[in-house]
């Protein structure tokens, strides 16, 4: 079976240990997805020189954040890696293998709700900071065969992500410019408008700079677009904005039986 593809706006690391509407939506998605042979995660939190593929047999849990409560640092997500899939992907597409990285919080904060037993093998593909948006989409296209081998592609980032403008007095709402950018990305996804998605500055360079002062949280959705096509249905298991500047939108690509 051709696996669906999931993009998750992962938001705060605290979502890893909290029970809230967002985490409950992840648990509901788990019930809709076929069980994958492995999960391939493209996370905003692994940016490298060149594209790397994590081939560790037992990836470590990386607590790549600071200033949060102790229980968050005590979380260990001990899923096995998928070294054979990782090495095959790297070999076939001339990517680098890596054995030192692990599951960063863009990966494990989502995986522990999707697969709480940590019994599904998983590996990560890094974001090459030198690639253009078009090149991220192109690499996504090269990864399509993973879906046919039963691998779930999971993009983890945020469609809007500006921590410099976070407003703690807006826990469930957003500034107009943040809502506008999220709305434009949603429309482009539904129209399969890869030209606009690969050049979001066409919506206005100022708007892009407000939505993404740095671009690593935007790039993962481009891999999801690359590995999907017009035959894949699009649904939104969760939609919402937080603290003025963070889109928590979740996008599920694929045609599910239920």
Image (tube, rainbow, N blue to C red):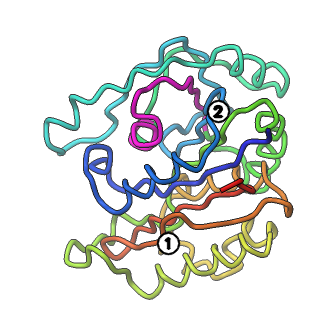
Regarding mark 2 in the picture, which secondary structure is present there? loop
Q: Quadrant of the N terminus?
A: top right
| Residue lying at the far top of the rendered structure | 57
Based on the picture, tell me whether residue 170 belongs to the magenta stretch. no
Q: Where is residue 250 in the image (x, y as percent from the top left)?
A: 53, 61
Question: What residue sits right under mark 1 in the picture?
Answer: 211
Q: In which quarter of the image is residue 146?
A: top right
Give the residue at x 58% y 59%. Answer: 218
Rendered position, 108 above or below 96: below
Q: Nearer the viewer, residue 253 or 248?
A: 253
- Mark 2 Cα within 10 Å, few/some/many (few <14, many 20+)? some
Q: Is residue 184 left or right of residue 56?
A: right
Give the residue at x 78% y 75%. Answer: 191
Q: Quadrant of the C terminus?
A: bottom right
Q: Residue 125 carries which label?
A: none
Q: What stretch is highlighted in magenta?
A: 108-126
Q: Position of residue 171 (x, y in %)?
A: 26, 73
Q: In this view, does 1 lie to the left or right of 203?
A: right
Regarding mark 1 in the picture, which secondary structure is present there? helix
Question: What residue sits right under mark 2 in the picture?
Answer: 36
Q: Position of residue 244 (x, y in %)?
A: 34, 76
Say which label, 1 or 2, has the lower sequence index: 2
Rendered position, 36 above or below 133: above
Give the residue at x 73% y 55%. Answer: 254
Based on the picture, tell me whether residue 120 belongs to the magenta stretch. yes
Q: In which quarter of the image is residue 113?
A: top left
Q: Which of 114 and 83 is in front in this view?
A: 114
- Mark 1 Cα within 10 Å, few/some/many (few <14, many 20+)? many
Q: Which of 24 and 227 is in front in this view?
A: 24
């Amino acid at each position: 079976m051709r696996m669906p593809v999931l993009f998750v706006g992962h938001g705060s690391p605290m979502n890893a240990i909290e029970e809230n509407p967002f985490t409950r939506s992840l648990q509901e998605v788990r019930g809709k997805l076929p069980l994958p042979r492995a999960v391939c995660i493209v996370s905003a939190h692994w940016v490298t020189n060149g594209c790397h593929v994590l081939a560790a047999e037992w990836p470590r849990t990386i607590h790549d954040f600071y200033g949060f409560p102790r229980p968050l640092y005590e979380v260990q997500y001990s899923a096995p890696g998928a070294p054979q899939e990782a090495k095959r992907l790297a070999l076939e597409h001339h990517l680098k293998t890596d054995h030192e990285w692990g599951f960063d919080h863009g990966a494990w904060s989502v995986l522990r709700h999707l697969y709480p037993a940590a019994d599904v093998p998983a590996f990560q593909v890094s974001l090459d900071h030198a690639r253009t948006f078009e090149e991220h989409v192109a690499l996504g296209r090269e990864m399509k065969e993973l879906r046919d081998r039963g691998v779930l592609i999971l993009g983890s980032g945020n469609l809007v992500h500006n921590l410099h403008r976070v407003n703690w007095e807006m826990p469930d709402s957003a500034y107009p410019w943040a809502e506008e950018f999220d709305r434009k990305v949603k429309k482009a996804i539904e129209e399969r408008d890869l030209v606009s998605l690969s050049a979001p500055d066409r919506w206005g360079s100022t708007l892009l700079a407000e939505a993404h002062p740095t671009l690593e949280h935007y790039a993962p959705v481009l891999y999801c677009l690359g590995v999907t096509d017009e035959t894949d249905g699009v649904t939104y298991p969760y939609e919402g904005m937080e603290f003025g500047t963070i889109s928590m939108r979740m996008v599920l690509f694929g045609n599910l039986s239920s």
